[in-house]
């Protein structure tokens, strides 16, 4: 142990001990977990953890500690924790192994996705746990670097089926992001009785009641304070002068400084040197001491004084000792210590820590140090650590002697802070940069960056418009890409009438296309034309974009392919819809791009709904939710609303709809209105379906984006509600789309719309032609609905025998697909003809939870537990636990039987 042991059996920690005992006992049998021990400095967190860990039998104990000085060093804490077991990385999948090697500097430079790093660490610990249970202990978690914190929280939330226990000790000063979600064991001060017991066991104060009472009053039950005050008590109880409003921690720090100042000068210098070196590397400390003309053996005096502990690594008795000693040293003393540490650090093996020490060793700006920090920022950025990269670059800016170059580096730091999700800090850095002399290029960058900051903070109409207004400051290609990003951001969430068209006008004026058109340019033109022009004028640009992007997906980019998917769906091109949505999911998975995978899965789910593969759509949406949960992002609900609408699940739809617009989630008006129209058409509530579709039409007419498929729902609802006159605009849209883009899907919808509204001399021919056209497509659900509406028409024409054929086929198709409300609508019609619909057998998979069904589907398709774990950000052991539940519920015992159930 690195701090003086407090006898926890005497200080009322029995309840907390029981929490730990439950955690490690469960972990030993494969039911792992995590806990955060929280409390003020000196309250006994480390003593409690040390006592529990010291009694573990058969556990692999991995330890790390956050340090205030390493908060800006990328993956510093994670490296401490994983370094002893890194040889197990060879058992990991290639992508995970390479991710670990990249972040720990063991392989080729790369920028692994943070979720891949998290999954790799989970896999590493899983491999270690195959040899025996593992206990990971992270002390001073309030100081761990941002990248390590995200990974460790990710892992802690996924060890429930592992032989892994994770313990975090943190000061209770507002939990770092992520730790608040984990179970907590709060430590409070000791009561008087336990405090007296501690003093009696650990000190020799004797019966002096007045001194003991003063110590108890001043320590407020803090065990470290009790021991310190007792061992160094003065006649009136508490050592040294004390400010009237000082906290217990302030008093402890003053006590440590007082003890430090009584050491010889040379020893004090050595202790400050150790305080400036966060790792406790004694070899490094000895080298630095020699550079300063000091003998590291003098550290034994500091150990005897109870300030630190010497061992394989030097550790301060408590983090308060380190911070108090460092703060008490003069700035000149601290700079000289950092200078020696920088000179003693190997620039080949640890260039970033060397650069950081050099940066703290100087007063005046020095270009060579600034350049070294810039290189460290580049390395951190390449490894995905924007927070660390920003810290390096910000310090580089401070140490840059040339004012104009300083402004440029501060702007880079601001960009990195923005990418790290800190727009307020980014804005402050832009302000600092603007106070320096700037060239025209840097001033333009500053204006664009300010606009981006405002845009990221709110995505409001004003912020979006400002971003478009400043794109003229960018290179033409970059300007067009920025405009595409801005335009796409308001397409689905725009509740401001006319904004989309106004924004489109600004883009055409500010960023006209120049030179040869790239696929990105064609995609932007397609979206602008779709928003601003009539259908017949928009379709050509939309078709050009689809053709270009299908042949050159690499230059389009992953997130832009999602926009292309919507263009393809609006064009009613079923072949391109499936091809593009499948391709973008495959690419995102292959490249480990978890930032773009969720939305790719959602567009694939929409395509699966259209072709009648509802279970696959649900699996894709479940996987997207798993990725979003792992990343801590708010999921979009539009595609899930669409699936729920087609399934006819009114209760689930209401639940999803209620969550729109809450917790920072956009309302997604376009998707909600379309899905609501589908739901109510299936349920036979045609007035409600028409209201939803007309709301979407009004948004479209006012200049907002609307999903074109809603016009098909509008026509059906208007026809069934007896309000055919309300379908005039929709009919015009469907006719124009079919004429300008005569693919089978578009033509079929136009023919069916005419038949529904009896616009033609031969309605039956229109229905039959529509069904024939749908049969040429992959959109089974719309094909089945076309047969339903034809059967309904035949029954109303009193042609019952013919109606039965169509309604029976529609009912069977819709039931098989899972469109329950539409199937029930077909069943009602079939009963009206005198025939009872065929009963569908019970689906045994209905007994499974959504996650169990998702895992069963992946396994039935041939995936291993490890592969499914990678897809869903779960450990293989967790997957196996779910599979055992699946087998039990389905009454089977093997993967072969699971495959035979034809999932």
Image (cartoon, helix red, strand yellow):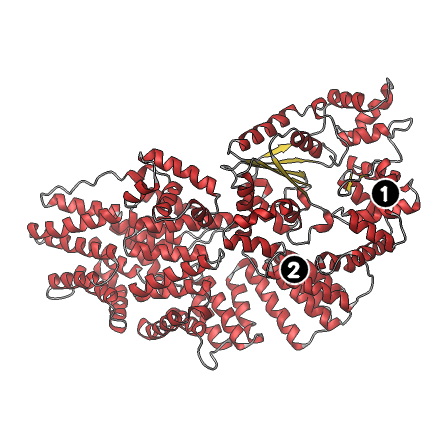
**Quadrant location, the N terminus:** top right
Residue 858 on image: x %, y %? 37, 47
Residue depicted at x 21% and y 44%: 824
**Corner quadrant of residue 713:** bottom left
Residue 189 on image: x %, y %? 71, 29
The 10 Å Cα crowd at callout 1, few under 14, some 14 to 19, many 20 or more, is: many
Residue 566 visible in image:
yes
Residue placed under numbered mark 1 in the picture: 299
The 10 Å Cα crowd at callout 2, few under 14, some 14 to 19, many 20 or more, is: many
Residue 256 in the figure: left or right of residue 145: right
Q: Where is 664 relative to 894, above or below?
A: below
Residue placed under numbered mark 2 in the picture: 389
Reading the chain from its start, which is encountered first: label 1 or label 2?
Answer: 1
Residue 516 in the figure: left or right of residue 710: right
Q: Nearer the viewer, residue 111 or 469?
A: 111
Residue depicted at x 14% and y 48%: 808
The numbered mark at residue 365 is none
Q: Where is 593 relative to 120, above or below?
A: below
Q: Where is 405 relative to 50, above or below?
A: below
- Looking at the rendered image, the disc whose residue lies closer to the viewer, 1 or 2, is 1
Residue depicted at x 28% and y 38%: 844
């Amino acid at each position: 142990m690195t701090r003086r042991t407090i006898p926890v059996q005497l200080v009322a920690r029995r309840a907390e001990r029981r929490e730990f005992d439950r955690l490690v006992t469960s972990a030993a049998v494969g039911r792992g977990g995590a806990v955060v021990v929280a409390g003020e400095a000196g309250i006994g967190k480390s003593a409690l953890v040390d006592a529990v860990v010291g009694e573990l039998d058969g556990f692999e104990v991995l330890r790390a500690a956050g340090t205030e000085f390493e908060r800006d060093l990328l993956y510093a804490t994670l490296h401490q924790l994983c370094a002893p077991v890194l040889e197990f990385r060879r058992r990991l999948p290639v992508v995970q192994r390479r991710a670990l090697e990249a972040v720990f500097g063991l392989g080729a430079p790369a920028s692994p996705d943070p979720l891949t790093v998290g999954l790799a660490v989970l896999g590493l610990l899983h491999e270690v746990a195959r040899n025996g249970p593992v206990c990971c202990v992270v002390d001073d978690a309030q100081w761990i670097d941002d990248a390590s914190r995200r990974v460790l929280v990710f892992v802690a939330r996924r060890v429930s089926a592992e032989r892994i226990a994770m313990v975090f000790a943190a000061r209770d000063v507002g939990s770092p992001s992520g730790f608040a979600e984990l179970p907590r064991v709060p430590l409070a001060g000791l009561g008087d009785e336990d405090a007296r017991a501690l003093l009696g066991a650990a000190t020799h104060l004797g019966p002096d009641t007045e001194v003991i009472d003063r110590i108890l009053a001043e320590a407020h039950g803090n065990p470290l304070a009790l021991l310190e005050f007792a061992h160094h008590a003065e006649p009136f109880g508490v050592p040294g002068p004390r400010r009237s409003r000082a906290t217990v921690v302030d008093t402890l720090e003053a006590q440590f400084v007082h003890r430090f100042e009584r050491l010889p000068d040379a020893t004090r210098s050595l202790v400050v040197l150790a305080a400036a070196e966060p790792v406790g590397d004694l070899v490094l400390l000895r080298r630095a001491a020699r550079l300063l003309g000091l003998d590291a053996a003098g550290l034994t005096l500091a150990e005897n004084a109870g300030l630190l502990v010497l061992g394989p690594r030097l550790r301060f008795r408590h983090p308060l000792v380190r911070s108090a000693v460092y703060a008490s040293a003069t700035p000149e003393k601290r700079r000289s210590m950092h200078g020696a540490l920088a000179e003693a650090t190997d620039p080949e093996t640890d260039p970033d820590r060397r650069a950081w020490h050099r940066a703290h060793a100087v007063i005046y700006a020095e270009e060579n140090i600034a350049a070294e920090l810039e290189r460290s920022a580049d390395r951190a950025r390449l490894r995905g650590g924007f927070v660390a990269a920003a810290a390096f670059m910000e310090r580089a800016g401070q140490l840059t002697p040339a004012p104009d170059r300083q402004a440029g580096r501060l702007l880079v730091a601001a960009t990195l802070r923005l990418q790290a999700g800190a727009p307020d800090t980014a804005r402050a850095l832009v302000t600092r940069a603007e106070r320096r002399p700037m060239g025209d290029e840097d001033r333009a960058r500053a204006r664009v960056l300010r606009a981006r900051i405002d845009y990221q903070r709110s995505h409001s109409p004003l912020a979006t418009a400002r971003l478009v207004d400043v794109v003229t400051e960018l290179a033409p290609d970059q300007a067009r890409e920025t405009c595409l990003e801005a335009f796409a951001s308001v397409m689905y969430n725009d509740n401001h009438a006319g904004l989309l068209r106004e924004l489109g006008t600004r883009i055409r004026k500010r960023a006209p296309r120049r030179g040869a058109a790239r696929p990105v340019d064609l995609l932007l033109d397609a979206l602008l034309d779709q928003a601003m022009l009539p259908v017949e004028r928009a379709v050509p640009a939309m078709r050009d974009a689809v053709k270009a992007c299908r042949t050159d997906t690499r230059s389009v980019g992953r997130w832009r392919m999602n926009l292309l998917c919507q263009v393809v769906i609006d064009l009613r091109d079923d072949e391109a819809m499936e091809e593009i949505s499948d391709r973008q999911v495959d690419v995102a998975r292959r490249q480990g791009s978890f930032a773009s995978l969720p939305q790719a899965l959602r567009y694939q789910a929409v395509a699966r709904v259209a072709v009648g593969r509802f279970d696959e759509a649900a699996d894709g949406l479940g996987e997207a939710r798993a990725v979003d949960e792992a990343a801590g992002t708010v999921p979009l609900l539009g595609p899930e609303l669409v699936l729920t609408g087609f399934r006819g699940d009114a209760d689930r739809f209401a639940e999803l709809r209620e969550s729109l617009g809450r917790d920072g989630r956009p309302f997604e008006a376009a998707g909600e209105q379309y899905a609501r129209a589908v739901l109510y058409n299936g349920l036979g509530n045609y007035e409600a379906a028409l209201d939803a579709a007309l709301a979407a039409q009004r948004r479209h007419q006012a200049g907002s984006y609307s999903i074109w498929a809603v016009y098909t729902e509008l026509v059906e609802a208007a026809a069934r509600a007896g309000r055919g006159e309300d379908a005039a605009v929709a009919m015009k849209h469907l006719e124009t789309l079919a004429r300008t883009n005569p693919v089978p899907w578009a033509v079929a919808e136009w023919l069916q719309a005419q038949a529904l509204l009896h616009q033609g001399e031969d309605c039956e021919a229109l229905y039959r032609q529509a069904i024939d056209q749908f049969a040429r497509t992959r959109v089974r659900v719309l094909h089945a609905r076309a047969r339903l509406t034809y059967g309904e028409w035949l029954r109303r024409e009193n042609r019952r025998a013919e109606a039965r054929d169509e309604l029976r086929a529609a009912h069977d198709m819709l039931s098989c697909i899972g469109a329950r409300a539409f199937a029930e609508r077909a069943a009602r019609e079939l009963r009206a003809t005198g025939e009872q619909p065929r009963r569908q057998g019970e689906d045994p998979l209905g007994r499974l939870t959504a996650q169990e069904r998702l895992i069963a589907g992946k396994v039935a398709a041939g995936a291993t537990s490890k592969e499914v774990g990678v897809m869903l950000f779960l450990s293989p052991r967790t997957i196996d636990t779910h599979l055992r539940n699946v087998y039990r519920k389905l009454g089977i015992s093997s993967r072969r039987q699971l495959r035979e159930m034809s999932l």
